[in-house]
Image (cartoon, rainbow, N blue to C red):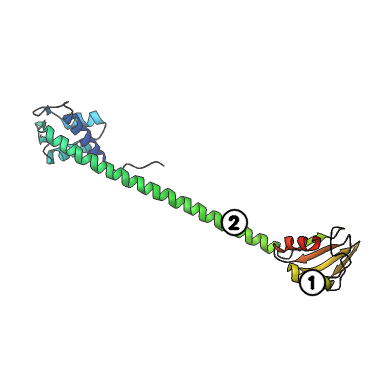
Amino acid sequence: MHMQRTTPRYQEVAADFAAKIAEGNYRPGDRIYARSALASQYGVSAETARRAICVLSDLGVVEAVKGSGVTILSVEKAVEFLEHYNEASTIMALKEELHESISKQKEELDRFAAAIDELTEKAERYRAANLFAPYKVAIDKSCTKLGKNLAETNFWHHTGATVIAIMQGDELIISPGPYAVLTEGSVLYYYGEQKCVERVHSFLTK
């Protein structure tokens, strides 16, 4: 993410010029005869250069006399200014980093919430569409309840499933009732919670 400049350009120019003084590139008593030279050196406007000199002048790093240019006064003041500037810059950088981190976390949470909403919506649509779709089970020779009716086997009691139809050959018997007989080759259609599928299979084969 691109961060916008938060430190004014004139402060950056003042800090860089102070760093040159601290490094010995300029000595106390040296004079710069025109703010335009500073503006040209840093590629900034004359007004930005003037404001940078004002900062250093207010802190006693330089002295600016109209018509006489800018005179370097103190290396120590330049170092002191840099220490405060760097500390403030570090704090500002940390603040920006925290803001960026919080912003990213918020974006992630928003995306996560949107994904949860979408998943919930799809689940609700699926459940609504399949609410009345019955389960089915084929009765084969492995069924231990062959020849018995639903009442005799206590089918609902043991499985929690309600039989709604039985397919016997080409005939579909709707609502067969408790006396419907479990015969090999028939297919039971029933309603119930998902867990009852396993219970039905287990009940019919054990």
User: Which amino acid type is shown beneath numbered disc 1?
Assistant: Asn
Q: Mark 1 against mark 2, which lies toward the viewer?
A: 1
**Cα gap from disc 1 to disc 2, whole angstroms:** 39 Å
Q: Indicate the quadrant containing the N terminus: top left, top right, bottom left or bottom right.
A: top left
The one of 1 and 142 positioned closer to us in this rendering: 142
- Alpha-carbon neighbours of circle 1 within 10 Å: few (<14), some, or many (≥20)? few
Left or right: residue 75 versus residue 206 is left
Residue 203 vs 43, above or below: the answer is: below
Left or right: residue 58 versus residue 181 is left
Mark yes or no: residue 7 visible.
no
The residue that label 1 is drawn on is 154
Circles 1, 2 touching at the beta carbon (< 8 Å)? no
The residue that label 2 is drawn on is 119
- Alpha-carbon neighbours of circle 2 within 10 Å: few (<14), some, or many (≥20)? few
Q: What element carries label 2?
A: helix
User: Which amino acid type is shown beneath numbered disc 2?
Assistant: Leu
